[in-house]
Image: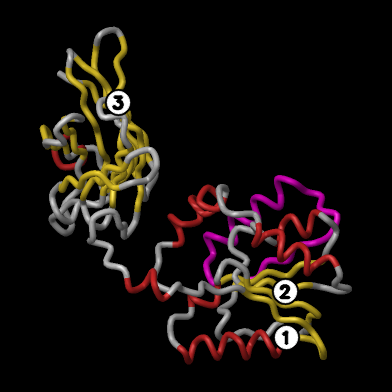
Amino acid sequence: MAMNYTAWADWYDIFYSGADPAELNFYQGICKGIQGPILEIGVGTGRVSLPLAQAGMEIVGIDLFEPMLKVAQQKALAVAPLNGSLNLIQADMRNFNLKRQFPLVMMPARTLLLATTEDDQLRTLCCAANHLTPGGTLAFNLFYPDPEMLAEDPEEDGKFATAHGINLNPIHNQLDITDRPSSRIQVHNEQGGFHASHKLPQGAFLCGINYLEYQGRWYAVIGCLRDPVEGRPAPIYIIDADTYELISTIRPKEELGIDLAQHMHNVTLHINGGELYLVCQAWNPGHYFVLQKV
């Protein structure tokens, strides 16, 4: 469970805003027929439970991490009064006792997998079962990996460990896709066929890629989550959009003293009044700033 939940609480709802609604629809569906209170283990920011409470259901939600519960509480206050109720409790899913039982206990969002050992998973399931009424329902979802996918080599051309940024290259009219852990740009045609791979410094986690024509030359700019050197503030790479040659490396924290720019995310090039600017988004903590070419 080692994760920065203070930062994750700020990004959680943004991350899930584009998620497939099938999971949310599933849990809303099984809750409709329940008579009595419902327990959500790993309630987080209330993504699943708050709409249920708004619909008139009695929900109890537990979560280990206070920053997540604070966001859930703020969201509940923002839509108060609720037609039902939402009771938020800080508790460890591996070892909790609410001294009551529920006809439905649910663990959405693959919460069980946050218990990373078999012993912790069994303890979590036992705690959940102990809070069920006789004949009650325990509902949870897991990630079931595709064996063929696991057997693939993410370093192979055309395969991805994490495909992060994607944009249409204005010169080649092909898709440039940043393969984050592999520190490379993979080029695909609009039908998805692989065309070429271009490496950048190994260890830089590439994020979004954006383009701009400036003084007769097309450039691409990429923000990186981390630097190839462990612990060093993350760079912004400016490359030739035609040849993919690395032209310039900018480290806003190290070189310009921008303290919140330890990790970069998205960067865009912008021209205003004939001047060239970089509009930058840092991550964890979130921060925006603008750099001007001098």
Give the image quarter of residue 153: bottom left
Q: Is residue 254 left or right of residue 36?
A: left
Give the image quarter of residue 223: top left
Q: Is residue 101 left or right of residue 97?
A: right
Choose between 99 and 140: the one closer to the eye: 140
Residue type beneath disc 2:
Leu
The reply to whether the C-beta atoms of the residues labelled 2 and 1 are less than 8 Å apart is: yes
Q: Which residue has dot 3 on it? A: 170
The reply to whether the C-beta atoms of the residues labelled 3 and 2 are less than 8 Å apart is: no
**Residue 119, percent across and down?**
48, 92
Q: In terms of sequence position, does the residue under pointer 3 or pointer 2 come before the other?
A: 2
Vertical arrangement, residue 122 with respect to residue 231, above or below:
below
Q: Quadrant of the C terminus?
A: top left
Give the image quarter of residue 110: bottom right
Q: Secondary structure at mark 3?
A: loop
The span shown in magenta is 64-89
Residue at x 70%, y 45% (from the top left corner): 78
Q: Secondary structure at mark 2?
A: strand
Residue type beneath disc 1:
His
**Residue 211, percent across and down?**
28, 27
Q: Quadrant of the N terminus?
A: bottom left
Q: Which residue has dot 1 on it? A: 131
Residue type beneath disc 3:
Pro
Vertical arrangement, residue 2 with respect to residue 186, above or below:
below
Disc assigned to residue 212: none
Q: Residues within 10 Å of mark 1 (few under 14, many from 20)?
A: many
Q: Which residue has dot 2 on it? A: 39
